[in-house]
Image (tube, rainbow, N blue to C red):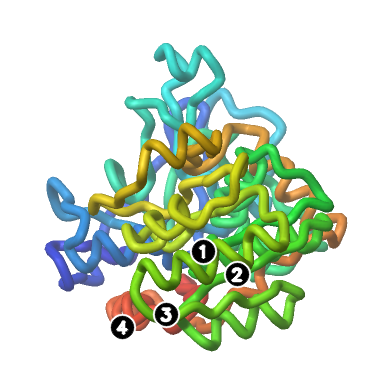
């Protein structure tokens, strides 16, 4: 089979590999489409290090083409979406229902071979059946939609409440889309005019702030306070926006950290404590609940995450696709595998 091997930062080789065989409890998936995620871009650019050359990619869609021993209830040709984070289900975190932070989890496209390939083998319960009523674009964006779903419901905000989303990458756009469809009022901050336009056309309210961090914090704080924003979702993965969120958060609100930044942000502990502002983490999704719920919402036409797809490319041109994704102007690039 063909696969895209990340050999080192900014260098990918399209290489031939043996087609994998499913182990006990696994199915083999013939992949057709794979989304490029921000984490793939970070690996490609060298912002996150890999221990050895790796086939990256994890937002996969395809068809079951071989069934391993011990698998029941699955059929050849079944269309499936990949859930790429596989908890060990044995550690203390897994046993307490927090498999999303399992220290032993298998991460497809990071600590084992990923989806920028023609075939992949996975435990059958991490290959989700996708009915024909769901389009390819909606199906291939289920994984990032599950991240957005988990973050929204990590907050205590409920439909009818007002929230703010900082940063409109794929997750921020999907979070705003989900919240709007479920009846939240949504304010959004984003530097990229095209991405901001997408959110506004969906019903979000743009907040445009300028000047120093101190000036922007004051502007944003005024708007959030006047509109009773009760939850702020930091999706940019930037120390600037994390600092802005904590500085501008209204009294009694929540800040949900969704974006991933390794750089230090700052906040005033006195403000956080005196105003009882909560800082809530949100990372990936819970198995099996979040994927199941997202698929139900798509199937019932409540949400359509495929709207974020802005470009298609091929496996042979994946390096070009990753470079385009790194520029930050596309909301979601899809790699057509075969």
Q: Earlier in the sequence, mark 2 or mark 4?
A: 2
Quote the CA–CA distance across marks 2 and 4: 30 Å
Q: Is residue 32 visible?
A: no
Q: Position of residue 332 (x, y in %)?
A: 51, 73
Residues at marks 4 and 3, CA–CA distance in whole angstroms: 9 Å
- First-in-chain label (3 vs 2): 2
Sequence order check, earlier mark of 4 and 3: 3
Q: Estimate the x, y position of residue 269 in percent, counting from the top left.
A: 37, 37
Q: Is residue 192 above or below residue 277?
A: below
Answer yes or no: do the residues labelled 1 and 3 have beta carbons within 8 Å? Answer: no
Q: Are dots 1 and 2 in contact, CB under 8 Å?
A: yes
What percent of the width, then of the height, locates residue 336? 49, 74
Nearer to us: label 4 or label 3: 4
Query: Looking at the image, is 130 positioned above or below residue 208?
Result: above
Q: Which residue is mark 4?
A: 320
Residue shown at the point (74%, 76%) measured from the top left: 202
* CA separation in Å, label 1 and label 2: 6 Å
> Is tag 1's residue or tag 3's residue first in the polypeptide sequence?
1
* Residue hosting label 2: 188
């Amino acid at each position: 089979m063909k696969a895209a091997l990340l050999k080192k930062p900014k260098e990918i080789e399209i290489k031939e590999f043996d087609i994998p065989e499913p182990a006990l409890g696994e199915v083999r998936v013939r992949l057709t489409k794979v989304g490029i995620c921000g984490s793939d871009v970070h690996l490609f650019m060298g912002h996150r290090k890999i221990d050895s050359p790796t086939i990256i990619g994890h937002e996969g869609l395809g068809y079951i083409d071989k069934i391993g021993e011990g698998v029941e209830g699955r059929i050849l040709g079944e269309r499936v979406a990949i859930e790429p984070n596989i908890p060990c289900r044995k550690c203390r975190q897994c046993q307490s229902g927090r498999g999303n932070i399992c220290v032993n989890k298998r991460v497809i496209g990071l600590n084992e071979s990923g989806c920028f390939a023609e075939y992949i083998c996975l435990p059958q319960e991490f290959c989700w059946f996708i009915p024909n009523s769901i389009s390819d674009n909606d199906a291939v964006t289920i994984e990032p939609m599950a991240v957005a779903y988990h973050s929204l419901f990590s907050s205590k905000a409920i439909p009818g409440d007002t929230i703010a989303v900082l940063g409109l990458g794929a997750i921020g756009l999907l979070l705003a889309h989900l919240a709007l469809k479920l009846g939240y009022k949504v304010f959004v901050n984003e530097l990229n005019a095209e991405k901001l336009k997408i959110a506004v056309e969906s019903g979000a309210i743009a907040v445009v702030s300028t000047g120093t961090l101190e000036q922007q914090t004051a502007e944003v704080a005024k708007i959030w306070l006047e509109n009773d924003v009760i939850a702020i979702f930091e999706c940019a993965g930037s120390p600037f926006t994390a600092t802005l969120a904590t500085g501008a958060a209204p009294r009694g609100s929540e800040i949900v950290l969704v974006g991933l930044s390794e750089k230090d942000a700052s906040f005033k502990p006195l403000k956080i404590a005196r105003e009882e502002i909560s800082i809530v983490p949100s990372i990936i999704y819970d198995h099996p609940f979040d994927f199941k719920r997202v698929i139900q919402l798509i199937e019932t036409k409540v949400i359509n995450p495929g709207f974020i797809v802005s470009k298609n490319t091929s496996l042979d041109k994946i390096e070009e696709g990753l470079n385009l994704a790194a520029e930050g102007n596309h909301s979601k690039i899809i790699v057509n595998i075969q």
